[in-house]
Every structure is written in structure tokens, then in C-alpha cells.
Amino acid sequence: MSTQKTILIIEDDLNMGFLLKEYLTANDFNVELCTDGDKALSAFQSTRIDFCLIDVMLPGIDGFTLAERIRDKDPDVPVVFLTARSMKQDKLKGFNLGGDDYITKPFDEEELLCRIHAIMNRYNGKRETVEETSMATCHIGNYLFDVQNQALILRDQTQRLTYRECDVLKMLCQNKNNLVKRSDLLQKYWDKDDYFNGRSLDVFITRLRKRLSDDNSVKIENVPKVGYILQDQ
């Protein structure tokens, strides 16, 4: 069985697309190249895709909308946005949609490859340590957090968490009622403590608060500019 990973590139500039495909193929990836969102969605449904590189400015549906539709089908697939636009609001939108990175054209191919490997390593479980895997379940108020199956269970209702939601909640659980520093979360799961990764972390904290909102005894307290406390009364 092949161990090669498959990258889906969605890029309407054929020259750019073919150059990326040739470079990534030479670096031991299988590559699917699509020039618009409809073709990309079809390829995503018919092929096992391990990673998505999405140009933001596409004909028809834009890259952000395409990423949302792809994430609806697989919430855990890594997504990196490629764009010629470097405006702050575009980067924030990409991270708020759960993007793993946002790369502005022109970019260095070797740097892109390094970023792909770093993100894939996190998704492939390299982040898991003996300490982390030793916690199979955790009670949070009336919730049962099933770490192994990435599930949050309240009575007969089950919410399936994304891998990143699971990671953040796991670290909060391991330090329940104690402060978890933002810098520790960012270094552990994003590999870098910077502004844009910090905004991405804020998005996942907001999602977790919503998932835990049916139990008033549970709260994720924000300690401004420092970190978070998972309070379980």
C-alpha cells in the first residue's frame, strides 16, 4: 500500500498550478490539480485527499467558500490558503474559517514544502505524547469528553470535535481549574506564538465555549493576554 500523501491544489493560474504540481510530485506527493471550485469538490469526493492548497481568488466560488464546503465534508483536512492579496482582513478571514496557514504570493517553494510537512506532522499524530494518550476520558461538568474518539457527550447527545478542538480541550482538561497559558497552547499545537495564530486560537476557544454551553457549571474563563481556565464547579 502506498504511503504517499495526496495534495489537492486549487489554482486557476495554470502555470502556477503546474509548477506547484511538478515541485510537490518531485517531493514524493501525489497531486490533484483543479482550476475551479466545482472540479475541486468533485475531486475531493472521489479521491482520498490529505491536504488542500486553495487559491483565494477563483472563478465562480471563491477560495474561502470552497474551504467551508470542503470542511463540511471533512472537518479535519488541513487547508492552506494561497493568495496574491496580503490584506489583514483576508488573513483573519482565512484563519477564522479554520485555515492552517495563509501564504502570500510570490512565495518560496522550499518554505511552502516545510510548512506542508509541519502541518501534516501535527495532523498525523506526531503531536501526541505518552502523557497525552494516557488520558482516555475526562468529565467536564455533566459532559463526558471522550479523547480517543474526539467526542463530547452530554446525556444522549454526542458532538464530534475537530482534531484541533480536541487538542485544546484536552490541554484545558489536563489543567482543569488552573491557568493554561496562551503561549503554551500556541507553541504546542500551532508551533508558533504570533498574532495570526493567536486569532486562530481565539476562534477555537469560542467554538469550545459554544459546545459546552448547555451546562452552566462549566466555563472557559479568559485571563486577558495570559491564557484560559477551564472552570468546572
Image (cartoon, rainbow, N blue to C red):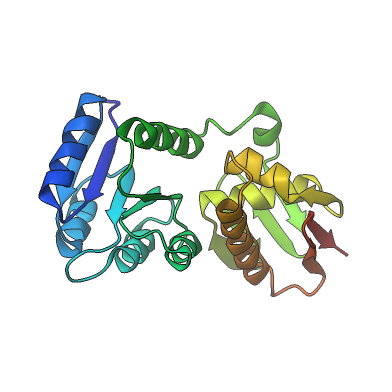
Q: Residue at x 79, y 54 (%)?
A: 226
Instruction: Determine if residue 123 is in view.
Output: yes
Q: Nearer the viewer, residue 77 or 151?
A: 77
* Image position, residue 232 (x, y; %): 84, 61
* Whole-percent x, y for residue 88 in the image: 48, 63
Is 212 positioned to the left or the right of 26 in the image?
right
Picture quarter containing residue 59?
Answer: bottom left
- Report x, y in % for residue 127: 57, 34
The image position of residue 221, as x and y in percent, is 80, 64
**Image: 142 above or below 190:** below
How many numbered discs sit on the rendered protein?
0
Residue at 55 percent of width and 50 percent of height = 164
- Residue, x 82% and y 70% (percent of image)? 217
In the rendered view of the protein, which quadrant contains the N terminus? top left
Q: Locate the C terminus and report the quarter of the image it occupies.
A: bottom right
Left or right, 217 with reference to 82: right
Q: In this view of the protein, which residue sits in the foreground, 45 or 24?
A: 24
Relative to 222, is 93 on the left or the right? left
Quarter location, residue 145: bottom right
Report whether residue 150 is seen: no
